[in-house]
Image: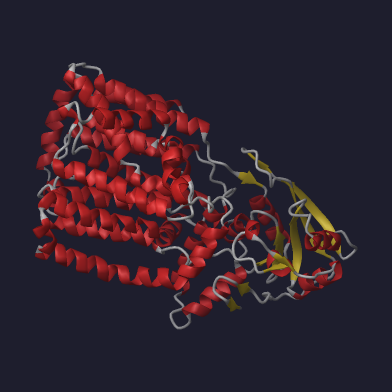
Amino acid sequence: MRALTIGPLLWWQLLTQSSLSTKLSKEKEFFMASPVAERTKGWLTGLVAASPVEDYTAIGLLACVVAGLYALLPKNGDIWWMDASRHAMNGAFILDFFHQLPLRHPVEFAYDYYRQYPALTIGFYPPLFSVALAAFYALFGVSEAAALLCELTFLFLLACGAYRLSRHWLDSAPALGATLLVIGAPELLFWGQQIMLDIPAYAFLIWAAEFYLRYLKGAPNRCLYLATLFTVAAVYTKYNAIFFVAVMAVALPCARGWRALFDPSVLRAALLGAFLMVPVAAIFFIFARYNLQQAAAAPVAETTVAGGAAFIYYAAVLPAVLSWPTVLLACGYLILLPFIPGLRLSRADMLFLIAWVVIGYAFYSAIAVKEPRHILFITYPLPLVAVLLLDRLFMRVRWRWRSQVVMALAVGVFAASLITRPVPYVMGPKESAEIVARLAPPDTNVAFWGHLDGTFIYAMRAYSGRPDLGVVRLDKIMFHDVAIYFEAGLKENDLTPARITDEITNLHAQYVVVQTGYMNDHPTVQALEAAVHSDKFIETQRIAMSSNYQFTNISELVIYRLVADVPHSRVSPPLEIKLLGKTL
């Protein structure tokens, strides 16, 4: 923790000492003359070859920060967020698909996989992050540690992109400070350390902005094509990154005039982007109705926000997303901008940043489902202008410590975010999966009832070492008309304890894992508890759940064994996938 907060500031101070700078300038000449830099210069002009040694050092510091974050993370499979466990499971599905290559029956393979591990959301989200996860799983094995390594790699790419983008307006030290304000923002840092889509998509979006800004400033057409490819990649990671297409379309005529819209290179880039978007657009529209149902059912969503409240929602949560110092400094920049010409950017730069914030804000405000992390994609310009205010005001008074002030602010915000919002974990589901995997007979099912079913199912795939076992979610038997979340409403099936026992027996589930007290105000859950406490079951072991947060759904997981031996063959229940309107 100490190295994360104090290290970057001390290392930067050492870097800027005059004697060391002289030595580094000689190293810079060496790097600039190297064959690797010359070859890199062809496509990524200015990215590596034209970067001073201070830039290499800043990137190295960011790598150390991200590596430190990874070292501090809980990564033993105790995943607390339901979506995170399912994203992790999607990557395992992609890996297993490529291992088996069921090209003749890919749909049947997906259905069979879901029967064994009913925690997939593949298809309801764009596929790119799942493919990236599969690549990391192929290298490091299927585990939460590998999944988080993939996530933190994207966080590092986001940091590198934010730093390169900031260098258009800032020297290396304040640019590093702006980058730390971006990745150290409370909301971004919290979700950036979990297996989620937001940070990978934002990383692609930041690099799209970097290359597009270069193109607007007169860089070769290849920067336009790279910007297009990165924007497409962002949409293939998370659908709502699509707003950036409108930002690009508005910024181009503002920076280069209306004729630029009809430039052959622009038309080619637009055609390339449209062609590449066809598959992801098809996926989106096929699943559009189901995605809307899922979003509307989300218990965390502010679905009632409408009218004027919808427009001010994200403005109200912005300090919690970015931190109060960042927001106050950004507001100070906007207030002083008309009176201090030195704060102004070039017309093309300013219009691009304004379009980024305004279009993005209008886009997310128009969506009924609201959550603070949804606004992350438009936050970059605000930390930038916050640092611009400090840097250029101190430059006017020629204060030599301005870089240190910026860095101190950035490190302080980063440290506060890290300390006040640690990544949650819930222990118990993974341990119960490992225990029941050691007990279960071959080629049978394990039945589960509890809050973190996705975490349990992922643990059965990642940690049990028992690919012969399947998982039966008892909620699929006890309830119906449940799309995603119980909080959105459900209908109970009329089941007695004897009927539940018969269902478990017929599904060849020798062992049942039940979370005590979970939703036990429902008669069907009471029937399940009565069944497992009958003479048909034997209690095997109890696992206490624990967490570093005060969650409500923390109790015990109890493993029960069905007294009667079940046949050694997996039987899957007829699963109704309500979102697809399909029964397996």
Residue 130 in the image: x percent, y percent? 44, 61
Nearest the eye: 569 or 480:
480
Q: How many marks?
A: 0
Does 88 appear above or below 394? below
Residue 580 in the image: x percent, y percent? 54, 74
Q: Residue furthest bottom?
A: 104
For the point 81% across and 61% down, which residue is it? 523
Q: Residue furthest right?
A: 535
Nearest the eye: 171 or 92:
171
Residue 570 in the image: x percent, y percent? 68, 74
Image-quadrant location for residue 55: top left
User: Residue 40, can we see it?
Assistant: no
Query: Coloured how?
Result: secondary structure
> Horizontal placement of 251 versus 277: left or right?
left
Q: Residue furthest front?
A: 308
> Horizontal placement of 436 versus 206: left or right?
right
Does 562 appear above or below 583? above
> Horizontal placement of 303 versus 569: left or right?
left
For the point 19% across and 35% down, which residue is it? 169
For the point 27% across and 58% down, which residue is it? 245
Residue 124 in the image: x percent, y percent? 48, 65
Q: Could you tell me which quadrant the C terminus lies in?
A: bottom right
User: Residue 92, can we see it?
Assistant: yes
> Horizontal placement of 220 versus 60: left or right?
left
Image-quadrant location for residue 98: bottom left
